Image: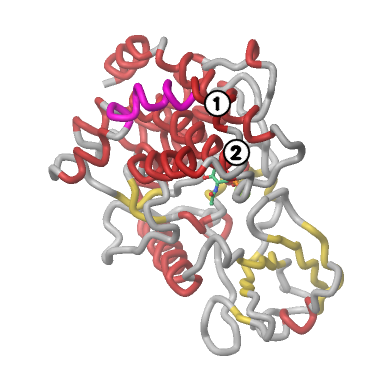
Amino acid sequence: MGMIDTAGILAQFEIKGAVKEVKPLGNGLINDTYRIVTSGDDAPDYVLQRINNAIFQDVDLLQHNIEVVTAHIRSKLEAEGSDDIDRRVLQFVKARDGKTYYRDEADRYWRVMIFIPDSVTHEAVTPESAYDCGKAFGNFQKMLVDVPEELGETIPDFHNMELRMRQLREAVQNDAAGRLDEVLDIVKELERDADEMCQAERLYREGRLPKRICHCDTKVNNMLFDQQGQVLCVIDLDTVMPSFIFSDYGDFLRTGANFVAEDDPDLSKVGFNEAIFRSFTQGYLESARGFLTPIEIKLLPYAVALFPFMQCARFLADYLNGDTYYKIKYPTHNLDRTRNQLALYRDVRKHDAMMSAFIQSLL
Ligand code: GN1
Ligand code: MG
């Protein structure tokens, strides 16, 4: 915990019980997270989190989104008579001033949630769990289709492919780290498909594609499971914002359906796992097909390609910029990530027809 005065921070929130222990939780790269173990009858454990306000610059907007979304999900669960509601949606603890976050003297932002008892996270996806993940993320979007107010973007244009190409072109122009020569072929390949990959933004401007409230960070470890392996709820709500539904569908498969991790340098192992694609898609469509428009469904294979493509452009831009955004463990880490995502993109594109046929077969 270093210099952080957890007792002082926790004193700002309306928590029950006495703090017995504070221990690090999870392996997120963006926020710092701690589990607060308490003693005392009916005192729950808590999760204390420092919000990274370098990345999420409008904490007030961010927490407002989270409050609206969790309240909406809670009311949906109540209306359908769901059991165990407190384990199916996150609950935030109010600070003394009534807000769901607290800003300390050092300009750090903190929030506290109730720790969901008997919950675990998983790091790996199997064909069996992919179906449940698809259902859960589809259901998350479904519950939020009728949120009664417009939410802001916690990172403006987060998944806007046109913006990501502009940022890459700028990085190429600047060549700040002097690395352009070794990646020219990759830049060319991305430029070749850039127009196609930017079709969502064009369709949006033409009024043919909606934005909906999405999670925008749909990794398997952003979900809580119970001890029996059933999905409890979706967590890590900082990036919940209006986006194309492709964000949740495509980004899950980018990590979940790659045979290896996104930074594996052995490109011969990178590839698109069809079994996981199939079961995730089946689960997702079971939840989501009722609200998706034909164009959203038709473009699901595009979404599967879009996210490795976008991530490739983002990693490459960061490599060219001299590694200013993503944490790296060695100097060519972002280059390995770039090549990995490009290899995945190429392999996904070989599955375009298969993906479309499979989706058609489910409808
Ligand atoms: C970042 O920190 P992490 O792994 O949850 C990034 C995602 C990228 C991902 C690539 C706010 O997420 O968009 O897909 O790295 N999040 C942000 O590993 O930029
Ligand atoms: Mg996370």
Is disc 2 placed on a helix, strand or loop?
helix
Q: Magenta stretch containing residue 196, yes or no?
A: yes
Is disc 1 placed on a helix, strand or loop?
helix
Q: Magenta stretch containing residue 4, yes or no?
A: no
Which SS type dominates the magenta stretch? helix
Where does ligand 1 appear, by image quarter? top right
Residue 209 pos. (x, y %): 20, 41
Task: From the viewer's perspective, tell me whether residue 43 is left or right of residue 65.
Answer: right
Q: In which quarter of the image is residue 287?
A: top left
Q: Quadrant of residue 112?
A: bottom right
Q: Is the residue 11 above or below the residue 53 in the image?
A: below
* Camera-side residue of 78 and 196: 196
Query: Which amino acid type is shown beneath numbered disc 2?
Result: Tyr
Residue 26 pos. (x, y %): 72, 50
Which residue appears at 36% of the width and 10% of the height?
Answer: 354
Where does label 1 land, which residue?
183
* Camera-side residue of 202 and 193: 193
Q: In which quarter of the image is the N terminus?
A: bottom right
* Camera-side residue of 350 and 142: 350
Marker disc for residue 319: 2
Query: Which amino acid type is shown beneath numbered disc 1?
Result: Val
Classed neighbour count for the residue bearing mark 1: other residues with Cα under 10 Å, few (<14), some (14–19), many (≥20): some
CB of residue at label 2: within 8 Å of ligand 1? no
Tell me where the magenta segment starts and ends, as one range: 186-197
